[in-house]
Image (spheres, rainbow, N blue to C red):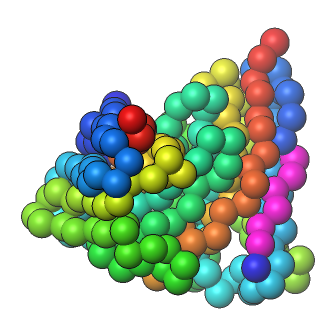
Amino acid sequence: QSVLTQPPSVSAAPGQRVTISCSGSSSNVGRNYVSWYQQLPGTAPKVLIYENNKRPLGIPDRFSGSKSGTSATLGITGLQTGDEADYYCAAWDSSLSAVAFGGGTKVTVL
Amino acid sequence: VQLEESGGGLVQPGGSLRLSCEASGFTLSNHDMHWIRQPTGKGLEWVSAIGIGGETYYVGSVKGRFTISRENAGNSLFLQMNSLRAGDTAVYYCVRVYSNSFDIWGQGTKVTVSP
């Protein structure tokens, strides 16, 4: 069981918007930065969002991040078939002195 | 800028393996570095970290069995894994930290613990 809770799957039609939630606690999401990762099949994960809501160079603005209290959200607008992947949230847990990951969310484009 | 892991393979329960990660294009000792693993078909699991100051951290299930270290001269990161168990079977990624996130990932090295 993961320290951070994500829905197992979300789906939407091309061009639509999806959101992925990441629920934690005061020792992780509530206190530390959240980052989000995209893992395409057969590849290593790639950072999409860092420090809650910042995008690395090269990540399109269709991807956005937000955080409120002990929950964070990844939003994807203008959904494309190339967005089909597993998405993970992560945050440092100050009580565990460890990195906490969400269990991952599979995005399906209908 | 890249990371390349090596050292994975098949090992019997109770055995040992030493994973290596060679960094190129940047100085490894200037960054916190982590090992993250992923069992086949499952999610990401954080394993261990070494800070810029040399402080180390481990997930509870590997404490006392795994040791993270780095060699500045060789710009390399290591993970010494002892008393391996079936539950340690996974792809192990070497990962760099930048701006509070994992910005550079290696391609991964597969560890299989089986009789």
| Residue B111 in magenta stretch | no
Name of the residue lying farthest toward the left: A69
Residue drawn where x is 67% and y is 34% of the image: B90
Of residue B101 and residue A110, the one placed in the foreground of this image is A110
Residue drawn where x is 77% and y is 38% of the image: B110
Counting the numbered discs, the total is 0
Of residue A42 and residue B89, the one placed in the foreground of this image is A42
Residue drawn where x is 52% and y is 83% of the image: A57
Q: How far across and down, in percent of the image, does residue A93 sit?
A: 32, 59
The quadrant in which the C terminus of chain B is found is: top right
Residue drawn where x is 34% and y is 54% of the image: A15
| Residue B4 in magenta stretch | yes
Q: Is A22 left, or right, of B63 in this rendering?
A: left
Q: How far across and down, in percent of the image, does residue B91 sit?
A: 70, 40
Assign the magenta stretch its main secondary structure. strand
In the figure, residue A35 lies in which quadrant?
A: bottom left
Q: Is residue A71 above or below residue B61?
A: below
Q: Is residue B39 above or below residue B68?
A: above
Residue bounds of the magenta highlight: B2-7
Name of the residue lying farthest toward the top: B115
Q: Is A57 left, or right, of B92 in this rendering?
A: left
Of residue A40 and residue B36, the one placed in the foreground of this image is A40
Q: Is B49 left, or right, of A12 in this rendering?
A: right
Q: How far across and down, in percent of the image, does residue A87 sit?
A: 43, 49
Query: Is any atom of residue A65 visible in this view?
Result: yes
